[in-house]
Amino acid sequence: MTPESDRTPETKPAKPLAGWRVLVPRGGKWGDSVAATLRGQGAVPVIAPLINFASTDDPTTLANTLHELQDGQFAWLVVTSATTVDVLNAQRVKVPDSTRIAAVGETTAAALQLAGYRVDFVPGADNSARGLVKEWPDSGIGGRVLIPQSDLAEPTLVAGLQKLGFEVEFVQAYRTVGVPVSAEVAHDVAIGRIRAILVTSGSVARQVAQQLAPLPEETVVVCIGPRTAFDARAAGLTVHVIAEERSADSLIEALVEYAEAD
């Protein structure tokens, strides 16, 4: 029998992101959740919000439009982000039973349900504006549609639903504004200490390009879906990894796969 002192200690296999410092571009619950998942894979998350959300610069129009919504004047309400859900909640909007609610993806749908709103339609295959239009239910064609979005929202959704025959009304629900990163984070990116940057939207991509480019060649840019990758490339970034789905889990899984194949 081998003495206890002579036994070779078992070494645990390294986690796939061990030694990786990963920039997380959003704070709050989302950022904390992503940071926890990254730690579980061995990474060191660096939470550095690059964008924030501010009140609309036209609150009167927003208030009037939300009044029309509560009055049952829209056949559909289309929600594209959890931030829009926060606006609806803050305004204490009650959506009538006659108005159906569509969410662009599972994350937005979960935010709606958590806030007490029902969800009538979520695209199954593609959690994006294009996917929502492509998978729109035939039974839901016609009538007025309200789309409360950021001031920087792409016209894809409005144009797509108009082609389906809807009378579409866009209203600015909030503004997306850039947030300067700290000098320490900017320095760490510049010297290559940040191994990967998560890019969760076109707005984030543009802030990365404005504040942190040119990125070191070894810095891995990870985008949350093809549309964000397109926006990142348009902003001048080199994209290394594209998540298949627009979710935090898919984003991290894509980075893990990249690291394991590296």
Image: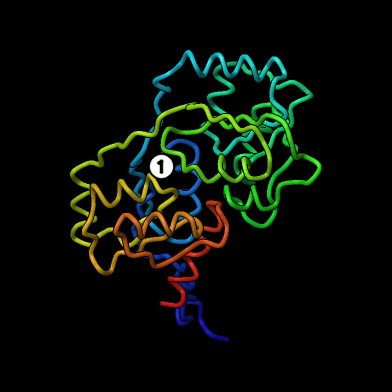
Q: Is residue 190 above or below residue 169?
A: below
Specify the color scheme: rainbow
* Image coordinates for residue 192, horizontal then vertical, percent: 23, 62
Q: Is residue 156 above or below residue 112?
A: below
Tell me the residue at 61%/33% (across/down). Answer: 168
* Image coordinates for residue 153, horizontal then vertical, percent: 46, 39
- Sort mark 1 into few (<14), some (14-19) or many (20+) by Cα contacts within 10 Å: many
Q: Nearer the viewer, residue 260 or 206?
A: 206
Q: Name which quarter of the figure residue 50 lies in.
A: top left
Q: Nearer the viewer, residue 238 or 258?
A: 238
Q: Quadrant of the N terminus?
A: bottom right
Q: Give amino acid for label 1.
A: Arg
Q: Is residue 49 left or right of residue 34?
A: left
Q: Tell me if I can see residue 166 in this picture.
A: yes
The residue most toward the bottom is 1
Tell me the residue at 40%/29% (across/down). Answer: 175
- Circle 1 sits on which residue? 26
Q: Is residue 148 above or below residue 223?
A: above
Tell me the residue at 68%/17% (across/down). Answer: 70
Q: How many marks?
A: 1
Q: Quadrant of the C terminus?
A: bottom left
Q: Tell me if I can see residue 39 in this picture.
A: no
